[in-house]
Amino acid sequence: MSMYLVSVLLIASGVWGNPTPQHPATRQAPLTNQYIHITDNFEMCLAAAPSSDGNGAAVVIEYCATGGNARQNWTISGSTLQVLGNMCLDVTDGAFANGTPLQIWECTPGDVNQEWVVSGSSIQWSQEDSCLDLTNGNATNGNVMQIWACTGGPNQQWTLTTGPSEPITPIVSSTTCLTAPTNANGGKVVVDACDGSTSQLWTAIDSTFVVHGDKCLDVPNGNTANGTKLQIWDCTPGDANQQFFFLSSDQNIQWLNHHMCVDLTDGSLANGNQVQMIPCYQDPDANNQIWNFGIEYIYSG
């Protein structure tokens, strides 16, 4: 399954505030395999609640499943957001009130309760100045989503990726994972035994590798010296120190525009070994720069 991860801007508005409701234009082809994250936390995914996959099942936020999960895998088709085949994101009873919970319901052509406008980072109900909203700003696993008057605030900012968070493992060991043990700025990026924790789940988006929801793989101070050890730092749009891409043909993680690659320092799989940057293809052991990631290609420039 292709895991080409990109931030999706479906209609370039760039304007926050209260967008004017409108009927979306018909899309030429559905966008499949979409994972919808609250922008402040890529560890969390929009999902149909696990209690039921039938009409009326709640729409919740929950931890993104490693390797993907059908309840978190959405298709954007025309003005609908579909999940589990033919179930659609639906405003319960078509109620306009703030706080109306969201559910899934069998997709019905022309049902206005199921029509949405995805614009910039907002997902707005096409019939009302109401947006998909993280209820009470609470990203707790299982929190039921609601509609609320569109404000452009963080509770209403969403990012789409074509794939969930995934572990990154060196080619020489499928049980060793790239790890950010702490979520503090300046925290080391190391290898450690895979344990499925969020410190080992990475999302590639807009040429960045995100972990802990809002921290990015980062080259300290943009240091181009051989052997520079990698860290994490608050994700900053456009920060050149955080721009990386994964190329499936070589399976290396390259620092954009620098021809330097993430390298398993000294080829050591010892827990806590901090990974480094050195020029691509110049490590005597080529395997030190080969990584497995649940994607095929993350660069189009």
Image (cartoon, grey):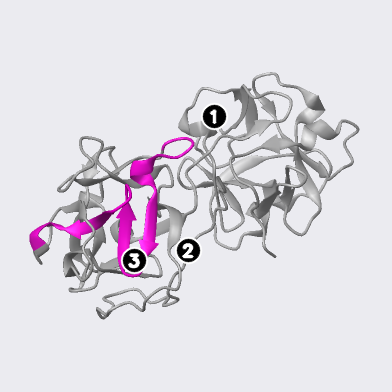
Q: Position of residue 27 (x, y in %)?
A: 41, 73
Q: Is residue 149 above or below residue 201?
A: below
The residue range painted magenta reads: 65-93
Check if mark 1's residue and mark 3's residue have beta carbons within 8 Å: no
Is residue 181 magenta-colored?
A: no
State the residue position of label 3: 122
Q: Which mark is residue 8?
A: 2
Q: Amino acid at mark 2?
A: Val
- Taking depth in this image into account, of 299 and 193 the one nearest to the observer is 299
Q: Position of residue 294 (x, y in %)?
A: 58, 40
Between discs 1 and 2, the one toward the N terminus: 2
Image label count:
3
Q: Secondary structure at mark 2?
A: loop
Of badges 1 and 3, nearer the viewer stands 3
Residues under labels 1 and 2: Cα distance? 29 Å
Which of the image's four quarters has the C terminus?
bottom right
Q: Mark 2 Cα within 10 Å, few/some/many (few <14, many 20+)?
A: many
- Taking depth in this image into account, of 78 and 103 the one nearest to the observer is 78
State the residue position of label 1: 181
